[in-house]
Each structure stands twice: as structure tokens, then as C-alpha cells.
Amino acid sequence: MFTTTGSRGLDKAPLSKGLLLVLSGLTVVLTLLPQYNHLFTYSLQAITLQHQVWRLVCGRLICLDLKDTFCNSLLIYNFRILERRFGSRKFASFLFGTWVLTALVDFLLSEAFHYLFDYQVSELPAGLLGPVFSLFVPFHSSIPKVPVTQLLGQISVTNKSLVYIVGLQLLTSSPFMWLVALSGLVSGKLYHGNALGVQRLLFVPRWLSRVGAFVLEPLFSGPPPPNEPPLGMGATLDIQRQQRMDLHDQQMLLAQFHQARRNHRPPQNGLMNWNRFFPSLRHRGQNLPPEPQPHPSPQQLHPTAPPLLEPTAPLLVNTPVAEEQVARLMEMGFSRIDAQDALRASNNDINVATNFLLQHLG
């Protein structure tokens, strides 16, 4: 509940899945074959004095510590929302650009540390750590912070708290991890802000992206999330009915979305026609008085029954929306009209509006 990663699994995130499988698998192999670990150490002294430039590649891909691999994998899994938001090519360009920039910033920071404290940093933690730390920059600026709960009435827990906690755990895993983290944050800020036009110099070419999509995407593309979540044991009839209604709402949203994409008709308000979205969510919010619930349909009580025809939804209720919530959605790149309509349709439930916009319009 503490993350904003959208739907479950690695759907629409083939690059994130490939990084998780390949890098974690190589770490396990090196754990079983420790005699080859010295080939993948990130030794700055060996690079500068012995001119082993190949360590800039081998030492900055595979983690040699299982704890670092676990935290790094958790961060990549949560940052998959950025791949869904920006697309695999832009996500790969960001990782490649920051991977190159962190190689330069690592040496600059180590030299600055040597000049200030007269201590030579000879080795840094190995692995794809710098680019992963750099992903905190777009994650912080592009993903809105939504309060989830409070601890002890004072500490606010948001939808991004767990990601920051995992990053803090990774930061404290080794003595000089702070230097790698600082290098990643500086590189991420430079690339995200396109300082000196770095995005035009360090990027993944379109032809390479097409080749990767053709060859690698079938291998690493994740399956779509299941259409129907399993019911918990001991769930009451009311809970089952509520879950069936939520599932029916999602199916109606997806059907309307795909129908609009097939028709290629210009939308009337924003990107999509929101007058037919969230038909039943408007009657379940806290801003409207409770209404009598109709008897459950056979499709809700029996999922195996034949599907019912999609009902005609009334127009959206002209519910006032909070400008602060509209601003949070607009920070992610969505238009003001779509942000307002999504909040009205979800009855000012920013979690529902954010998840739907990220999954289907991002």
C-alpha cells in the first residue's frame, strides 16, 4: 500500500524485468563461483594506475553482495512505474545516460574526497547502483506524493515511503555507498534536467530500441495482471459483492478505453470521454449521501455466468475538485481537463484517479 507502482507484476515493463532477471541471476552465479569475483570489482585504483578500463563496464553491472542485490532489485521493481510512464526507450536512455555520467562523477567525487580529507578511495561497491540511485530524481519529481496513513498521529506515511526506506537501507549497506548514491543523484539531476543538452548526446537510438523490442520484449514482457483477484478466506458476502463490483468497474474502464483507441475519434474533454468512466465509483464516495444498493446481479454473484451488456452510465456529477489534487496530477504530465474529470469521476479519490491515469494514459 506504500507504493505507486500501479498494477501488480511487471506488465508493460520488459526492461525492468530483464534487469531483474539477468542481474540477479549473474549475482547468484558469482556467489557460486567466488573465484571470479575479482573480475567484477569496481576498483578505481586498478582503472587509474593499471589502466584496466574494462572494469568500468564489468564493475558497474553486477552486485557482488547479496544484500545490495536484494535492495537494488526492490528499487528496480518499484521504479518500473517510470518505464510505464515514459516508455521503455526513454527509460533505457535515462539508465544509459546516467550510467555513463556516474562513471565520470565517481572519479570526480573520489578525487574531491582525497583532496579534502587526504584519503584515497580505492574501491567502490560494484553493481548497477549509480543509475538506480539516479532514478530517485524522476521518481521524486514525476510521481505525486499521496498521504496514506499516519504513525503515532505525527509521522505521515505516503505512497512513496517504502521506496525511500529501501533506498536508505541500500545507502547504509557499505562504507562508500554514499559516494555512489551522491554520484547517482547528481547524474540523475543532470540528465533529467538536460544540462548541456546531455539527452541529445546519451540516448538509446530508435533502431536499437526497435531491435530490442523485436528480439528481447517477447522474452521479458510480463504477463498482464489477473482479471479477477482471489477472494480472501472467510470473506463475507458483502465483501465478495464489493470486489465483484470493483472488477466490473475495471472491465468497463478498459472496454471504454480500447473502444476509444479503436475509433480514433477526437475526445471531447481532454484525452478521453470521462462521462462514462467510473460509473459506480461516484455512488460509493464519501462526498455523496449513501444510496440504496440494488440487488446483486447474477454476474456479480457467479463470475462464470455469461457477461452482461454494458450499462449506460449517466453524466458525471459536477463535484468540485481540490486544486491541490489537480496540481499533483498535472505534475505528472496529464492535462488539467483529464485531471479534473478523473477526480470528479472517482469522487475526489486521488488514489483511484492516479492509478487509472498512470496505467491507461501514462
Image (cartoon, rainbow, N blue to C red):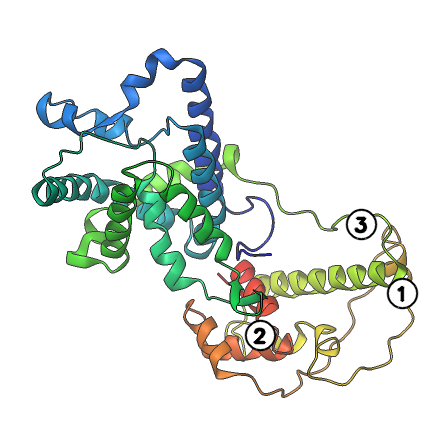
What element does badge 3 sit on? loop
Specify whether residue 216 is in view. no
Disc 1 marks a residue whose amino acid type is Ser
Q: Position of residue 70 (x, y in %)?
A: 47, 35
How far apart marks 1 and 2 lie (CA) works out to 27 Å
Residue identified by numbered label 2: 342
Occupied quadrant, residue 142: bottom left
Q: Tell me which numbered mark, 1 or 2, is placed earlier along the sequence.
A: 1
Q: Nearer the viewer, mark 2 or mark 3?
A: 3
How far apart marks 2 and 3 lie (CA) works out to 30 Å
Residue identified by numbered label 1: 297
Query: Residue drawn at (28%, 17%), measured in percent from left and top?
Result: 38
- Examine the rendered structure and indicate whether residue 188 appears above or below residue 277: above
In screen coordinates, is 252 left or right of 263?
right
What element does badge 1 sit on? loop
Disc 2 marks a residue whose amino acid type is Ala
Q: Position of residue 94 (x, y in %)?
A: 31, 48
Contact? badges 1 and 2 (CB < 8 Å): no
- Examine the rendered structure and indicate whether residue 244 appears above or below residue 24: below
Occupied quadrant, residue 295: bottom right
Contact? badges 3 and 1 (CB < 8 Å): no
Q: Tell me which numbered mark, 2 or 3, is placed earlier along the sequence.
A: 3
What element does badge 2 sit on? helix
Q: Tell me which numbered mark, 3 or 1, is placed earlier along the sequence.
A: 3
Query: Residue drawn at (67%, 61%), measured in percent from left and top?
Result: 255
- Residue density around tag 1, few if under 14, some if 14–19, many if 20 or more, within 10 Å: few
Residue identified by numbered label 3: 232
